[in-house]
Structure formats: structure tokens, C-alpha cells
Amino acid sequence: MKKGYVVFLLVFMMALPFVTGALAEENTETRKDIVDTAVEAGNFKTLAAALEKADLVDALKGDGPYTVFAPTDEAFEKLLKELNITPEELLARKDLKDILQYHVVADKVMAKDLKDKMKVKTLSKKKLTITLDPVRVNNANVVKADVETSNGVIHVIDTVLIP
């Protein structure tokens, strides 16, 4: 009886990586993409409107992987006050697409991958500087990291990054 139990445990332990791998793969497929995740969160309305206006929604629903440093609605409100403009004026800016692409890296960069003074190239072909303790992207604080999606990761920031 003991021998049968040992054999069962060995078979179970050998099969476990395949089972957990299949479950992880299934979980990835059920996750929403970057755009849907941001919209569902509810505090990225301005970002969602800007992505739509700049015709970037389909790109960020693509395969990726992408890392998005996503400014909250509060971050956009702060920017509007600083620039003394309305949301409509922001959405009408000729450089809107460049501003948004400055928030996106064409790779999946998790918090554990970050290093102090690290530079990451964005879709706008410009670089962001990452600093640690506290975690910042240029002058923006990362207020929530590692929101995983089906096509990348979102790091929530408190300031809109301007190239």
C-alpha cells in the first residue's frame, strides 16, 4: 500500500507543472486587454477618450506585449489646470498621439524588472527614466504597479508625462 501511495505522489508531482501551466495559460486568456482593463477600472476616462481620439485603441488592444504608464483622471485634471486648458482642448492637441505614445513601452516591464536610473524607450521613440524609492517614471509617482492584462501590464501614475 505504501508503494502505491509513493508512486501516486511521484506521478502527481510530475504532472503538476503541466496542470498549473495550463491553468496559467487559461487565466491569461480570460484576462482583459490593456484598454478594457483601464476602462473597467473607472478612473481612466480621460485616458480612454484620448486613446480613442488619437486612434490608438486598436493598437493597445493588439497582441503586445505593452507596458502602459497610465495617468488617472486626477492626473489629467492636474495637467489641465497646469496648462489652463479644457479637456476638449487637450483632446484637440496636434501632439496628443505623441503624448500618449510617450506612456507606452513595447515590452512587458514588471515592477521587479525595474532598476534605479533605468531608461526605457517608448513608442514615441523617446526615453523615460525610472527611479526607485519611491518608484517614479520621470516626475510621476507609480501609485499602483503590475496590473496584468492579456497583452501586457499597466502601472498607474499620478502625473501625465509630457515628452
Image: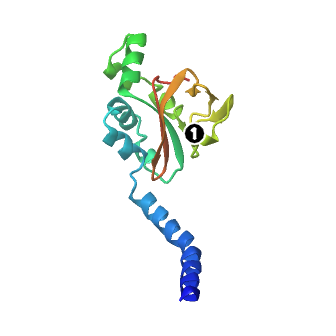
Q: In this view, does 20 lie to the left or right of 42?
A: right
Disc 1: CA contacts within 10 A as few (<14), some (14-19) or many (>=20):
some
Nearer to the camera, 32 or 161: 32
Q: In this view, does 15 lie to the left or right of 26?
A: right
Q: Residue at x 58, y 43 (%)?
A: 109
Report the label total.
Answer: 1
Residue 152 in the image: state x and y as whole percent: 50, 48
The quarter of the image holding the C terminus is top right
Residue 57 in the image: state x and y as whole percent: 40, 43
- Up-down relation of residue 70 to residue 77 (above or below): below
Instruction: State which quadrant residue 42 falls in.
Output: top left
Q: Tell me the amino acid under the disc marked 1.
A: Ala
Q: Which residue is drawn at 59% across and 79% down?
A: 10
Residue 116 in the image: state x and y as whole percent: 68, 30
Q: In this view, does 121 lie to the left or right of 45?
A: right
Residue 69 in the image: state x and y as whole percent: 50, 34
Q: How is the image coloured?
A: rainbow
Q: Is mark 1 on a helix, strand or loop?
A: helix
Can the viewer see residue 92 in this picture?
Answer: no
Q: Residue at x 67, y 32 (%)?
A: 119
Instruction: State which quadrant residue 14 falls in.
Output: bottom right
Nearer to the camera, 19 or 141: 19
Can the viewer see residue 62 in this picture?
Answer: yes
Q: Name the residue under label 1.
A: 111
- Up-down relation of residue 51 to residue 162 (above or below): below
Nearer to the camera, 90 or 130: 130
Q: Is residue 141 left or right of residue 113?
A: left
Nearer to the camera, 76 or 20: 20
